[in-house]
């Protein structure tokens, strides 16, 4: 069980999105099958949590995640994709 960084709801890890800051400073969505290395934070797939995600991720991962990145993340979730990278 992991907690969403926005609403703190606990849910099984597979149902949450894992956003990871990789060792080389990229922020990406980790959708496996192998866990990406780096510091991770978990998010619900709910739109209300994605909307509040930038601030929560900045706090959790010590990065500045842009709203554009979160928008892209939301779209990726809807499309079942998970290959968004952002250079910090
Ligand atoms: Zn949430």
Image (cartoon, helix red, strand yellow):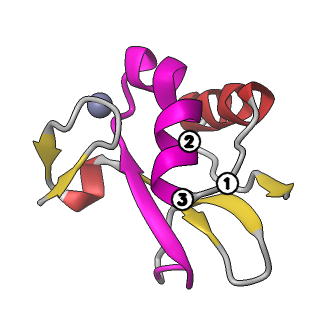
Q: Dot 1: few (<14), some (14–19), or many (≥20) neighbours within 10 Å?
A: some
Q: Residue 4, position in %: x, y?
A: 28, 42
Residue 19, can we see it? no
Disc 1 + disc 3, Cβ < 8 Å: yes
Q: Which residue is mark 2?
A: 80
Numbered disc 2: secondary structure: loop
Q: Give the foreground label among 2 and 3.
A: 3
On the image, which quarter does residue 18 sit in?
Answer: bottom left
Label 2, label 3: how far apart the Cα atoms are:
23 Å
Residue 75, can we see it? yes
Numbered disc 1: secondary structure: loop
| Image-quarter location of ligand 1 | top left
Answer left or right for 80 relative to 9.
right
Which residue appears at 27% of the width and 58% of the height?
Answer: 14
On the image, which quarter does residue 48 sit in?
Answer: top left
Q: Residue 9, position in %: x, y?
A: 15, 36
Q: Which residue is mark 1?
A: 63
Decide whether residue 43 is among the magenta residues.
yes
Disc 2 + disc 3, Cβ < 8 Å: no
Numbered disc 3: secondary structure: helix
Does 25 sit above or below residue 4?
Answer: below
Which residue is more in the foreground, 84 or 10?
10
Answer left or right for 24 relative to 20.
right
- Disc on res. 61: 3
Label 1, label 2: how far apart the Cα atoms are:
24 Å
Which residue appears at 69% of the width and 25% of the height?
Answer: 71
Highlighted magenta segment, given as a residue range? 35-61
Q: Locate the N terminus and report the quarter of the image it occupies.
A: bottom left
Q: Residue 63, position in %: x, y?
A: 67, 54
On the image, which quarter does residue 78 sit in?
Answer: top right
Label 1, label 3: how far apart the Cα atoms are:
5 Å
Which residue appears at 32% of the width and 48% of the height?
Answer: 16
């Amino acid at each position: 069980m992991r907690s969403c960084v926005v609403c703190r709801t606990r849910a099984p890890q597979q149902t949450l999105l894992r956003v990871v800051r990789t060792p080389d400073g990229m922020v990406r969505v980790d959708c496996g099958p192998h866990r990406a290395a780096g510091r991770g934070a978990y998010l619900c797939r709910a739109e209300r949590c994605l909307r509040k995600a930038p601030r929560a991720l900045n706090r959790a991962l010590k990065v500045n995640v842009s709203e554009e990145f979160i928008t892209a993340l939301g779209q990726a979730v809807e499309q079942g994709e998970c290959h968004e990278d952002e250079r910090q």
